[in-house]
Image (cartoon, rainbow, N blue to C red):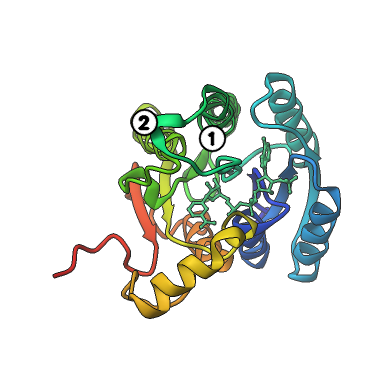
Amino acid sequence: MEKKSALVTGASRGIGRGIALELAKAGYQIAINYASNEVAAEEALALVIEAGGSGILVKGDISSESDRAALLAQTIEAFGRIDLLVNNAGVAPKVRGDLLDCPEESFDRLYDINLKGPFFLTQAVAKQMLKQGVDEAGFRGRIVNITSISVYTSSINRGDYCMVKAGLAMMTKLFADRLADDGINVYEIRPGVIATDMTSGVTEKYDKMIFEDGLTPIRRWGRPDDIGKAVAAIGGDFFPFSTGEVINVDGGFHLHRL
Ligand code: NAP
């Protein structure tokens, strides 16, 4: 069987790195995209190779049109096709602050990186997938969007983040609907509180909420490999009759409890 190939955005650190590692274990070759942290990206690639996989590093800002085009071109040049696109790269607001004071600049930054970039990258990758023949499993490709519990949870100190993640959830439904007839399934993975650089500034706050207050039925922080395993299940075609599906990887955060 030919090796499948994946393009994972923001795979140098955190959740993206966890996804790349689990895909490597599942036999994927991976284009590891990152924005600027070359040291972290090199480390991620070394870990992918150690896990038995292979890959390339592709530097590029997903909010830039020319970087997205280069990202796609370099991945195709290396692998010939893209079997799996994972829209993982994302940023939190630089400063958490009252909704009433949310600056336009922060809104624009989050919109560009967390929603507009993934939308136009997906558009371009979908067109590439449409040119590809079907694989052994009958698919031209698969697409996964990494959203957040912020899709439906109000955090009034980072409203911009919540709004763009809600947009990304809608984007999953739109592409799922558009591409189902073409042999491309689209999924949303909704992580809860995951231990990465993004959450390192609020460790104490979430430690208390998780371990003392019981924020999540499963009383632990999520790990990047928790998300990676869910993506590997999609990459391994364990959900062939599901599209537009939401997979919560959140320790049960989404349950309403009494
Ligand atoms: P992280 O540790 O801060 O890592 C972010 C990754 O995205 C890095 O690889 C970074 O590259 C890359 N990146 C940032 N801006 C980029 C851009 N403009 N273009 C391309 N790559 C870019 O974040 P994380 O916690 O792993 O989060 C990953 C995704 O999961 C995000 O979409 C986030 O919203 C979502 N999420 C996280 C949590 C959580 O609790 N951590 C919960 C729910 C959802 P460099 O290394 O080059 O900077």
User: Taking 84 as reference, is 206 above or below it?
Assistant: below
Q: Residue furthest left?
A: 258
Residue under the point 74% across and 26% down: 67
Residue where numbered disc 1 is placed: 114
Q: Is residue 182 left or right of residue 125?
A: left
Image-quadrant location for residue 186? top left
Of tags 2 and 1, the one toward the viewer is: 1
Q: Earlier in the sequence, mark 2 or mark 1?
A: 1
Three-letter code for the amino acid on which mark 1 is drawn: Asn
Q: How packed is label 1: few (under 14 Cα within 10 Å), some, or many (20 or more)?
A: many
Residue 99 spot, x, y in % from top left: 40, 35
Residue 111 spot, x, y in % from top left: 52, 28
User: Taking 28 as reference, is 116 above or below it?
Assistant: above
For disc 1, does the CB lie below 8 Å from ligand 1? yes
- Answer whether residue 222 is visible to the viewer in this image: no
Residue 8 spot, x, y in % from top left: 64, 46
